[in-house]
Image (cartoon, helix red, strand yellow):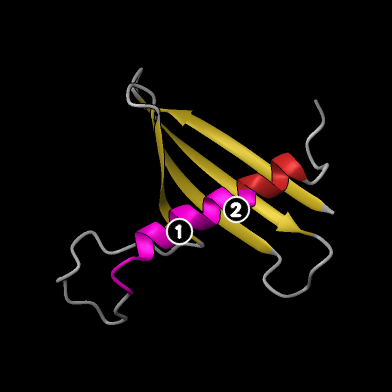
Amino acid sequence: MYNARFFLTELSKHSSVCDFTFSNLDSKLLNSFQFELNIYHDVELCEVNSFNGHSPSRFPFQFEKFPKSLDEKSQQNRFLTEVLDIILTSGFYEK
């Protein structure tokens, strides 16, 4: 059983921010994921701004206490795609 919540904030006619929370109520391990999404309407693009409170590095050469992988942004966007696929193909969503 899944639970999904979307909270959309319009910033302008060209962009929005969406807080998206997804929970797998059947799992006790990592059962809740929180995404902050940037949505750009004029170019029809959505990207993960942060995942569970962690943002990817804006600059790969930036010094950080906890270095991240160079493809973390790509990984977060790919994971968002997989979560949305679960919603759309698992009977979670009713037409």
Residue type at numbered disc 2: Glu
**Viewed as shown, does residue 79 lie left or right of 32?**
left
Label 1 crowd bin: few (<14), some (14–19), many (20+), radius 10 Å: many
Q: Residue at x 62, y 45 (%)?
A: 84
What quarter of the picture does the C terminus occupy? top right
- Residue at 27%, 82% in the rendered image: 65
Residue 25 location, quadrant: bottom right
Q: Main secondary structure of the magenta part?
A: helix
Task: Indicate which disc residue 76 carries.
Answer: 1
User: Quadrant where the N terminus lies?
Assistant: bottom right
The 10 Å Cα crowd at callout 2, few under 14, some 14 to 19, many 20 or more, is few
Out of 69 and 66, give the one closest to the viewer: 69
Question: Amino acid type of disc 1?
Answer: Gln
Image position of 5 (left or right of 60)? right
Membership of 75 in magenta stretch: yes
Q: Tell me the mark number nearer the camera, choosing from 1 and 2.
A: 2
* The magenta segment: 69-83
The x and y percentages for residue 35 are: 52, 52
Task: Please give the name of the residue rendered at 61% of the width and 38% of the height, measured from the top-left corner.
Answer: 6
